[in-house]
Amino acid sequence: MENWGIVTYRESILLADEATSSFAHKLGTAHTVCHELAHQWFGNLVTMEWWTELWLNEGFARFMEHEAMHDIFPQWNVWANFVQDPLALTKDAMASSHPIEVVVHHPDEIDQVFDVIAYRKGAAVIRMLANFVGNDKFYVGIHNYLVKFAYGNAKTIDLWHALEAASGLELTSMAHTWTTQTGFPVVNVTKAANGSYQLTQSRFFADGDSGPNKTVWDVPLTYVTSTSGGAQSADSWVKVNALQQGFYLVNYSPELWKALQGPVSTQELDVVDRVALLQSVFFLSRAGHVSIVDALEFAQAYALDTEYLVWKELSDNLVQIVALFDDQVWFPSFQAYIRRLYAPIMARLTWTHLA
């Protein structure tokens, strides 16, 4: 607990042994320690004016715990783990989700806002804005925000003003679309006959029902594309939302999904982008935006990948299919697909079959 001057921890969370503790335990300890210490600035030095702005405490503490861990333990690749964690997207894709900023009318309602949206989506939106304005200017703005409101209270609008002053960008209206609206968008990418790309957005729902919803977001678009010939060459590919810096999904036309298999299989794309594409294609398939056949075909591009997070993401998604369809007549064919897909990595790991 982040009490000012006496941060408290359970022994099982605080204590880790370098020689005997598992990596998961060390990771959990670092997350907790860094999170609670971050609260000394975000929550203690500057406190939100009212519970509606809880995310200024918890979203920032979660963001800063990752920043601290990345600086102390760069080999842990914690930002890639952050991207691979699907919980914020999963919860926010539900029709029952709520905005980051929830108006709290009575103290009895406070416990309801301590959830995944305030913590994890809040941190994801902060990461997106930090990348949008640039880390240097972002931290100038955060420094000024903390100095101005030290030993006092602040609202979300105070944060936007501090970041605007530091960056010279108009952020308030753009940022409000992410903190005051429920859900997140899926950006649909197609390629026109003249080689240009066309993008549209709609709110993403886990059940695939977009209905009459007209919510739109001010989306900070980034992309990475093929190095040979540029984005409009015949053999080009484009991956929108580079390094998955934005809190949104991207769906591509079938030919663009196909084109992305190349940089995935050659590992031209960064591991964060490879994991994000894998996560996205299965998210989209479960919502009916992409066929499960196309998702499984796309997954074959990862057969020679050696990154742990890739196989964790792949396994997390395939096990959901196993749980749903293990009683179907075609299930043995699916098992054969899994064996073929995992065979190269199992051979590399010197897997030994025991009868």
Image (cartoon, rainbow, N blue to C red):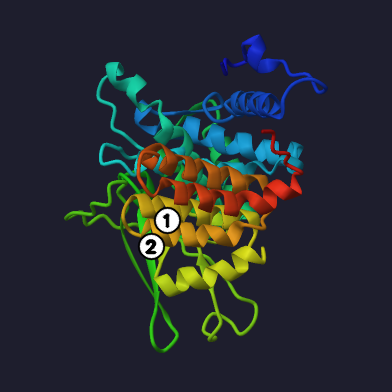
Q: Quadrant of the N terminus?
A: top right
Q: Which residue is mark 1?
A: 249
Q: Residue furthest bottom?
A: 194
Residue 187 has which mark? 2
257 in relation to 101, above or below: below
Image quarter in which the C terminus is found: top right
- Name above or below for residue 342 compared with residue 300: above
Q: Are marks 2 and 1 in contact (CB under 8 Å)?
A: yes
Residue 32's place in the image compared with 239, above or below, is above
Q: Secondary structure at mark 2?
A: strand
Q: Residues within 10 Å of mark 1 (few under 14, many from 20)?
A: many
Whether residue 303 is situated above or below residue 252 in the rendered picture: above
Task: Tell me residue 226's x, y (percent).
Answer: 60, 75
* Residue 219 makes an appearance in the image: no
The percent position of residue 74, horizontal first and vertical second, equals 74, 43
The residue depicted at 28 percent of the width and 16 percent of the height is 108
Residue at position x 62%, y 34% from top?
Answer: 65
